[in-house]
Amino acid sequence: MDPQSYTPVGTVREVTYDSSRPFPILFQMYGSVWPKVLPYCIANVLLTSLVLYLFLYEDIDVTFSDKAHTFMSLMVSFLVVSRAQIVYARYMESRHYLSTAMRACRELIHHMCVLTLYEKGEKAKEWRNDVAFRTIVLLRSLCAALEYESSGKNAWEIPELEKSERDEIKKKLFLNNKLDSARGKLSHGERNMKTENFRVPRLLQYSLRKAIVSERDGKLETPLHINEELKILQFVSEFNKAFHGLKMLVFTPFPFPLIQMARTFLFFWVFTLPFSMVGDIKSWQVLIIIFFLSYGFIGLEYVSMELDDPFGDDPNDFDDLTFAQMAFEDIYIAINEIDGCDAASQLRWRVRNKEHKGVFESFTLDEFNSGQSALPTANEMTPLVEDPSNP
């Protein structure tokens, strides 16, 4: 396999634009609501054309006074704009929590490495590698849980987990929690797949905490001071706080009555515009006004719909998997700096995507280290961090 041909999977193409160039933005379709809003604009223009034709050529007046329409426009504007503002605030809050979770993972590994900087034994290396791996899998499971509704893939089926680990997690979930079953006796009711997907990161947090405190089993020559251990555990708590913030937003959708009312007023107002405006503007110029009014109001509603669920594979969704993979790489760098390239390579191989035959995924660890792969061996790889003692 040619390493140059490897492309990571699960990424979302980013919506890019140059705000200093106004005209290209006007005609960019990727990430735009134009394709979804245009049919409504055309339909309203056709309706306006019919009303105008009847008024001008058939002497049939179906228009009405615009006074009531003017008052209604205030309500429509308030509902549509308020919805857009609330959705945008939720969108940015989701991004904040996601960033906090990834920062907590990076900080956890950095503090672990710094606090055990002078521990060079094999057991210490194995402990750091295990904590790093469980941190990566925890972050990966969070991404999978957030994307469950759009991808349909369960968080316990992420390819970074071994089959035995997946089976162990499934045993702890309420997937078939009938009351007469051993598992069902612990349940307070039926649970759906969405709730159980969000239970996986909680289970993995517990595993990570156990891995951190396992250093007490003689894995370090000088065990961590209790305050140092608590400092590392604190970042798991920070991750948990961000996780619950994201869970709150996912399980607390925008209030349905407000959406229903806003959309009812919106569509009624927009599609009665022709009957209101043709009576005042008795010319074909009214078609242009109707077109852009339809685009403005319905387009704003579609912007809210686009931002309402930022986790998935839509153009304006967060590319959370790519963000997570960048955090993984930062973790590899930290492990490389304290334990060397072999340890970092071993961690990278352990986090391989076992369902995708990419560069790291096509080989066993023995093949990778023995030089039978298309990649250089671990000893031949350029260290991620330059060694100042080796000019």
Image: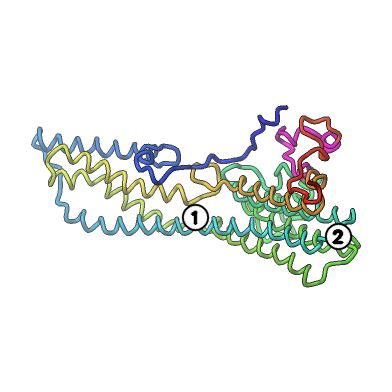
Residue most extreme to the left: 59
Would you name the residue on which mark 2 appears?
Answer: 119
Q: Nearer the viewer, residue 220 or 252?
A: 220
Q: Position of residue 144 (x, y in %)?
A: 64, 47
Q: Residues within 10 Å of mark 1 (few under 14, many from 20)?
A: many
The relative height of residue 257 versus residue 35 in the rendered view (above or below) is below
**Residue 96 x, y percent position in the rendering:** 55, 59
Q: Is residue 215 left or right of residue 321?
A: right
Question: Could you tell me which residue is drawn at 84 percent across and 37 percent down?
Answer: 369
Task: Please state which of residues 185 and 265 is positioned toward the viewer in this rendering.
Answer: 265
Does the residue at mark 1 contact the one at mark 2 (Cβ under 8 Å)? no
- The answer to whether residue 344 is visible is yes
Residue drawn at the location 80% of the way across and 52% of the way down? 129
* Residue range highlighted in magenta: 348-369
Q: Residue drawn at (16%, 56%), measured in percent from left and top?
A: 67
Q: Is residue 26 above or below residue 104?
A: above
Residue 384 covered by magenta stretch: no
Residue type at numbered disc 2: Glu
Q: Disc number at residue 91?
A: 1
Identify the secondary structure beneath mark 2.
loop
**The quadrant where residue 365 appears:** top right
Q: Is residue 177 visible?
A: no
> Gap in Å between the C-alphas at discs 1 and 2?
43 Å
Which x, y percent locates residue 383? 76, 44
Side (left or right) of 98 relative to 376: left
